[in-house]
Image (cartoon, rainbow, N blue to C red):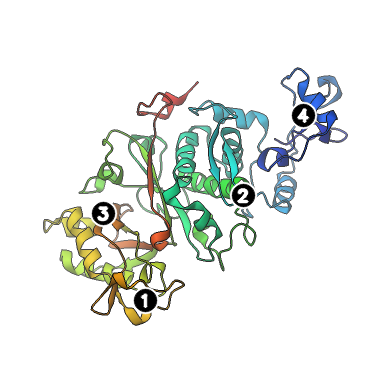
Amino acid sequence: MVIFMKQKIDKTCGCLIEDILGESPQKSNEQQTIESMKKSDILCPTSRQDMEIFVDPDVEKISLDFYQKKYTDGLPIVPPTRERVRKFYKYSAYEPQEVLALLPPRQGKATIEKIAINGVMAGCLPLFMPVLEKAILGMSQPQFNLAGVNATTHPVAICAIVNGPIAQELEMNVGAGCLGPGNLANATIGRAMRLCLINIAGAVPGIGDHATMGSPAKYSYCFGENEEESPWEPLHVERGLSKDSSAVTVLGMEAPHNVNDHRSNTAENVLDTIVHTISTAGCNNSHVPGELLVIMSPEHAETVVGEGWAKEDVKNYIHEKALVSVELGDRGGRRLDRKWVKEDMVSLTRTPSDVIVVVAGGVGRHTMVAHGFGTSCESVTEALVLKDGSFAESVKDYLK
């Protein structure tokens, strides 16, 4: 929360942005006395007549100040005023001070207030809050290994895939350009996730985030599955949820790589092109097999399903064929475990279930593939549920 007063900010009130996003320092007796005072709608212990609250019209100045304090991803932010943050609470199943998760490496407390602040800064609309909450909850699960994802020198980013009616309600882009710019929900939800990692988890590049070069996927990596044009069941249904429910799946993935195949007219030929693109030395999967993400265009999916291939067939085929030689695979960061070796070849996945297949995008015979973080990260799917455990049918169900 940022207050710009006519004279100066009273720093004893504890309302500055650093007191909220970071760990507050030991409070003085004066601060404790102030906190014991009756709370009001104003942020500082000054009478309403003595101050004027407004957002500095020089947004560039605010963004620069936040940038210099390492609160941003380098892009301009929306000032997180109290009123803007409060609007996000209306779409939360929790109270502002509830701790949703602890985010390493700093073990920062992801309160609803802090998540909302980062959502505002990222440019999210308040009704995006339920999706953002579940993404944060998913990445905090032990099997996701957020500590490893944040601390590694590998350029792994956190990808979020949104499924179900709420993705449509939020007008998420599931079609042409869904992994690129131009959609408010995709761009800002993904960006808010990264800002939460910076400001709550402490994943500041070079400090808590040790990626050698980083990745553009760390700015924003969020999209919806094109369920309407997919011939197969969507990801959340595959993971045990009903088609009418909504969910967010978070995955630790590298930036996606394109597979261009405009000429293949059989399922096997399309999949062979995909397999050849995936089977590269140097990715984590080549020495510590794990999850792979395959984002298939509707046209490629139509070709594959036209010959009767189920999604399980696709996963089995990629698992069996995506291989690299032992010689190349053993050049990775961790010594190759011989249990993954078969006839001097290494499989990039442990089982077919490691191959995560979704359909997204628009017109064009392209597929996107992304290598994972090997065995060091397991994807997590979180259903959008209300506090009583029932499935949310709409973001309006969260309104307080």
Q: Nearer the viewer, mark 3 or mark 2?
A: 2
> Which residue is under mark 3?
298
Identity, as a three-letter code, of the amino acid under mark 3: Pro
> Which residue is under mark 1?
329
> Which residue is under mark 2?
106
How far apart are labels 4 and 3 at the CA level?
Answer: 51 Å
Q: Nearer the viewer, residue 308 or 336?
A: 336
Residue in the picture at 74% in, 33% down: 15
Q: Position of residue 91 (x, y in %)?
A: 50, 28
**Residue 220 visible in this rendered orientation of the protein:** no
- When the figure is inspected, residue 155 is found, relative to residue 38, above or below; the finding is below
Residue in the picture at 35% in, 26% down: 390
How far apart are labels 3 and 2 at the CA level?
Answer: 41 Å
Instruction: Please report whichever mark, 4 or 2, sits nearer to the chain's N-terminal start.
Output: 4
Q: Position of residue 377 (x, y in %)?
A: 42, 56
Q: Is 105 left or right of 131, judged from the image as shown?
A: right
Q: Secondary structure at mark 3?
A: helix
Q: Quadrant of residue 375?
A: bottom left
Identity, as a three-letter code, of the amino acid under mark 2: Arg
**Mark 1, residues whose alpha carbon is within 10 Å: few (<14), some, or many (≥20)?**
many
**Mark 3, residues whose alpha carbon is within 10 Å: few (<14), some, or many (≥20)?**
many
Q: Quadrant of residue 388?
A: top left
Q: Is 351 left or right of 216, judged from the image as shown?
A: left
Q: Secondary structure at mark 4?
A: loop
